[in-house]
Image: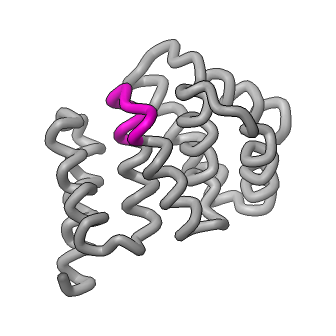
Amino acid sequence: MPTQEINDLFQQGLKHYESHAPLSEVVPIFKEITTREPKNGAAWTCLSWLYLLNNQPKLALECAKKGLKLGPTDAQARINLVLAMLETQQKGVREYMEQAVQILTLDKEQSEQVAENIFQGLERKPGWPALLKIQNWLDEAI
C-alpha cells in the first residue's frame, strides 16, 4: 500500500478514536495498517493502546513489544508496554518505566502527549488501576 494511503488510513483511525467511535470500529483500522505496513511502530503503539482500552492485555502486550522495537524512543510505546505488563502481571516494569521517564523528561512534546493519553484513558476507563499507578509514578518522577 502506498505511503499516502497508509497515512490517510492512520488519520482516519485517529479521527474515529478521537470522535469516541466504538473500539470495534477503530481496532480494525489499525490492524489493517499493521498488516499492510508491519514496520509502522506508531500503528503498533496505537493498536496496543486500543487493546488495553478494550480489556485485551495479552494482545496489547504483543503489540506494545512490536511498537517499542520499531520506535525505541517513543515514550508512549514504553508506557503501553508497562501497562500491558501490569495488566498481565509481568515482572520487569521498572526498567521500562525508568526509560519512559528519561524520555519524557527530555521531550516536552512527548510528555504532553503521554499526559493527554493518560487523561483520555482515565476518561474512557475511569478508575483504571494500572493507569492510575503509572500516572502516580510519572507525577513523582517528573
Which quadrant of the figure has residue 30? bottom left
The quarter of the picture where the N terminus appears is bottom left
Q: Is 54 inside the magenta-drawn segment?
A: yes
Camera sees residue 115: yes
Q: Is residue 72 above or below residue 104?
A: below
> In the image, which residues are magenta?
50-59
Camera sees residue 131: no
Q: Is residue 50 above or below residue 14?
A: above
> Is residue 20 toward the left or the right of residue 69 in the image?
left
Q: Position of residue 78 (x, y in %)?
A: 63, 50
Q: Residue at x 66, y 51 (%)?
A: 111
Q: Is 6 inside the magenta-drawn segment?
A: no
Q: Residue at x 79, y 39 (%)?
A: 94
Magenta region, mostly helix, strand or loop? helix
The quarter of the picture where the C terminus appears is top right
Q: Position of residue 61 (x, y in %)?
A: 49, 43
* The residue positioned farthest toward the bottom in the image shown: 2
* The residue positioned farthest toward the left in the image shown: 25
Which quadrant of the figure has residue 44? bottom left
Q: Residue at x 23, y 72 (%)?
A: 36
